[in-house]
Amino acid sequence: MKNFFRKVAFGIGPNEKVPNDPLNWSLNQINQIPELSWKGKIYAEKELRKHYREWVHGDRKVLRKKYKDNKTLYKIKKDELRHKTGQKFWESLELTIRHNEAINGNNPVLTKFWLFWSNFFAISDKDFLANYSTGAYHREIIRPNLNKSFEKMVYDATVSWAMIHHLDNSESAGPKSITAHEDWRRRKKRPATINENHARELLELHTVSPEAGYTQEDIIQLAYIMTGWQQRWSKSKLETGNVWFNSEYHQPGKKIVLKKEYKKGKKSLKAVIKDLVNHPNCRDFVAMRLCRFLITDEPTQEMKDPIIKAFKDSDGFLPEIHKAALKVAFKYNDKFRKFQTPENWFIQVAKVSELDWPPSPKIMDSYELGFRPTRKQRLPEKMLNELGHHPYRAKQPNGWSDISTDWLSPELLIRRLVFAKESYAFSKSKNNNIEFYEKIINRNFDNPGKIMSYLNKTNSFYQKQTLLFNHPEFLKA
Amino acid sequence: MKIKINRRNFLKSSIVTSLYLAGFGLPSFANTVSKKNLVIIMLRGGMDGLCAIPIRGDKNFEKLRSKINLETTLQLNSDFDLHPALRTFKKLWDKNLGSVVHATSIPYTGRSHFDGQNLMESGGKVPYKIKTGWLGRGMNVAGLTGNGLALSLPMPLLIRGVPMNDNYYPVEGTMPSEEILDIIKNEFEIHSEKDLSMILDVIKKRKFQSYGSRRNSSLALNAGQQLSKIDGPRVAVFEVDGFDTHAAQGSANGAHADCLKEYDNIIEGLKSSLGTEFNNTLILTLTEFGRTIKQNSSNGTEHGYGSAILITGGLVKQSQVYTEWPGLKKKELFEGRDLNSTIDARSVYASAMSNVFGIDFERIRKEVFWGEKLQNLSDKLFKIS
């Protein structure tokens, strides 16, 4: 039963009480979105985007031209610009805020869902999004929507600056739009065409999934609806302007997606998203993904049904969907144990064994713009890259897999072995005693005696650390 | 956390013996003097076959791609050019060690990356239905247990379906002691964690130290060294990401060119590290689909259908662009927008496995591809020994 605390959260810390009623403990955490528990500085997405702008503009429009004949000097100046814009720091700060919330926040179950939806609406590793924007997108777009409707979350994610950039929608122009007739297009031989990327992923990854049986024509029609949603471009801001609806790029006329008709204009995106999230395949897809995340690689209809019902009954209200998912996860808790993804596992290791992780506000706030961040300040980014599961750097827009077999390979297991061992370097000296291990095992395992005798096969504490966190019961939850 | 690597054991030379003692069937090469190797390089995101191997002198094609046409190309023959980033490929072509199958695809027309990639690896027709890869199943038929090496962090679906595969993707850090690994292994067994237990077995059998770059060019040097050993792996799998160029695809330089260059670096690394064993090796590419003929207004291309397979290695029959060219007129295109596919890409892979693994093509067709209608192209594409 105690694996439930890791299944839907990150385990029980050594100084926390084990809840008597695990299900209610989890259900009580998801109605409200508290302030982030991070006590250090938090920067607004727009402020970080300003740094993104300084970087792309400075590099593309200034340095490349100024130093086009001197590659060495260009490299030096580019490095200076990286540090002037904090390129090597923001990503680690965001990861720190994320891990701090999971480990030290009062609502770890809510945080678990935050991590889930951030991956569901993934921004994969493209351009400099991970460096400046993805963490802030998770914080400002995904997290505040955890107690709103799924429909709103889809809409907000779709028109967010990060997603519009990620999936190229700024580049999409209706072939019959006003811009299509502009002279410069003829002169530059750039006829207006749609870019299908965002529309395709809105259907496939963010709403109905291919199970809905949409056609290529549906994708084209949805892309027409989405034409005009773009970053406001200017010579000084380049692609970093706010997202707006540019009616000059919008394809006129009615559009038909999955047999439903939509009028032209800005409001059609909201209308089509409303229909997509109310499509039966969307409910099924969301239920399947939640069950796959929490319970098993192969969710059954019985597992999905209560989530689908909650979705339908509540009109997609996320707290109700989450509650249904938690109840199903609790029901199947003893029967199905899910292999934990590396980042989840790492956070659990840190929480359960009270590691000095993540870096403190003091460390992170001592960063000075313009200077190279310290090794400690860059550690979160480096650590997650080495672990092979950096949440801002998935390779493709479908994010990181939540299928167990995708996380099983010799190199992936080696990382668990190496990191469990190395995690000892982050342990507090006061915890280097057997009583501490007894305490964390009693809180997190149903069979503490067996786990302790397994652990007692070695006397060394750093080896106990390796053994405990590679125990099959800890690798799964 | 600064951590130094001191990992042991990678592809231990005694693997054949230990597998035999463990009751696994001996790989078929064990009694032969030399072995043949098969390398698959997965090009994720939809490789634009017409960017890698553009057709020559088609005015309509050039017009449709006015912004992404290649300013310079390397000429292959009177009908096809080669992208200038593929310099190693061209060198091999010039030595009769490189060829192309053009206008080919897996039988999937849905244009979704994720369904498409799943199918290119499983070899099936329904996404996510098959849990093993065509290469893993082929190795299983050939009894090639413990002979697969993935140069990536996850174990690609493509190679799943045969036990004891290894992968190599270096990490900083030190491994726990042998004694600790044994305790964990024992616990895996007590809990009937067969997969974890098998993986730990593979780890424990490793020999060489793990350090260095995770770049594909570096991984290729490593893989080539392993493949060149008589008791080394016989199959290797690489991944190149980033072919999904909806915007700023570029031409001779740019996003697609960078990806092609990365592929080219892999074959360059393999060529140099395989040494003479390059003569006994086949290296093929695999992608989920090609891209639209027409560029979009972001100077990119959209998801398409037909693409190309690039083949190199000493087992290539001859330099050729093997194709049943479907044409690029609107009516000849798939759904009026994509290069059509006239050759089921699985025929190429089934033929390659038949050739390298020394297994009858019909057996591969039946046991790996469920008896689907595939063509034996071995005598057309590969050297028959």
Image: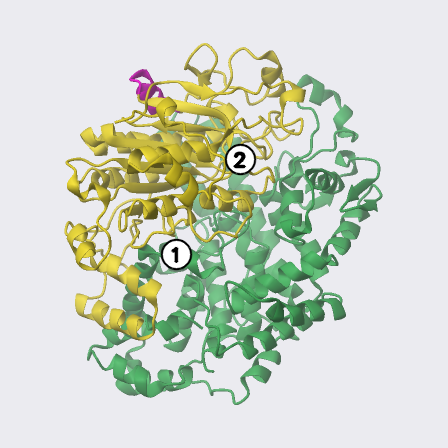
Q: Chain of mark 1?
A: A
**Closest to the observer, A343 or A427:** A343
Q: Name the colour assigned to chain A in the rendering.
A: green
Q: Name the image quarter holding residue A73.
A: top left
- Comparing marks 1 and 2, which lies closer to the viewer? 2
Q: Is residue A18 above or below residue A153?
A: below
Q: Is residue A461 above or below residue A340?
A: below
Asked if residue B4 lies left or right of residue B267, the reply is left
Residue shown at the point (73%, 53%) measured from the top left:
A276
* Spatial separation of the CA atoms under disc 1 and disc 2: 38 Å
Q: Which chain is yellow?
A: B
Q: Is residue B380 visible?
A: yes
The percent position of residue B64, horizontal first and vertical second, equals 62, 20
User: Which amino acid, mark 2?
Assistant: Phe
Q: Is residue B95 magenta?
A: yes
Q: Is residue A340 above or below residue A107?
A: above
What secondary structure prevails in the magenta region?
A: helix
Q: Chain of mark 2?
A: B
Question: At numbered mark 2, what does the secondary structure look like: helix, strand or loop?
Answer: loop
The percent position of residue B240, horizontal first and vertical second, equals 41, 39
Q: Residues within 10 Å of mark 2 (few under 14, many from 20)?
A: many
The percent position of residue A22, horizontal first and vertical second, equals 54, 84
Magenta part of the protein: which range?
B86-96
Q: Which residue is mark 2?
A: B289
Q: Is residue A331 above or below residue B147?
A: below
Q: Residues within 10 Å of mark 1 (few under 14, many from 20)?
A: many
The structure's colour scheme is by chain
Q: Is residue A177 magenta?
A: no
Numbered mark located on residue A378 in the image:
1
